[in-house]
Amino acid sequence: MFGTAVYANYWLNRNVGIGLRGQYFSDPEAVYIFDTDQFPGGGSVLEFTFSANLKSGPLTFIPEFRIDKASGQIFTDKEGNPDDMAASLLAAVYITF
C-alpha cells in the first residue's frame, strides 16, 4: 500500500483562510481498503478536501467538504447501495486559551 498527499493553503486575511488537499491511496494487494474476495486485484482511492479556516477571537471554525472516488464500489449511497463515490461535510471547532 502507498499513498501521497498535496496540500495548498492560502490566507485571504488574518481571519479567513482556504485550503485544498488531494490524496491518493493505492492498495494493489487488497490488504487495507479493498476486500480480497470482491477486489482480488486491489484498488485505489482519490480524495479531495476543500476547507476554510474562519477565526473569531480564540475560536476557529473549520468547515470541510470532502469527495472520495474509488476504483471499486467500497462506499454505499444513502439507500445502502454500493457506490464508488462518497461526499461528506464536516465542521470542526478549535478553542485556544
Image (cartoon, rainbow, N blue to C red):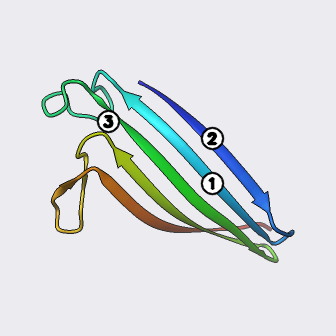
Does 51 appear above or below 26? below
The residue at which mark 1 appears reads as 20
Asked if residue 37 lies left or right of residue 60, the reply is: left
Quote the CA–CA distance across marks 2 and 3: 20 Å
Q: Looking at the image, which residue is at 48% across and 37% down?
A: 24
Q: Amino acid at mark 1?
A: Leu
In the rendered image, which residue does mark 2 sit on? 6
Q: Nearer the viewer, mark 3 or mark 1?
A: 1
In percent of width and height, residue 20 lies at 63, 54
Contact between labelled residues 3 and 2, with CB atoms less than 8 Å apart: no
Q: In the rendered structure, which disc, 1 or 2, sits on the residue that comes first in sequence?
A: 2
Q: Are marks 3 and 1 in contact (CB under 8 Å)?
A: no
Q: Residue at x 23, y 68 (%)?
A: 78
Between the C-alphas of marks 1 and 2, the distance is 8 Å
> Three-letter amino acid code at disc 3?
Ile
- CB within 8 Å, label 1 to label 2: no
Total of numbered circles in the picture?
3
Quadrant the N terminus occupies: top left
Q: Which residue is mark 3?
A: 33
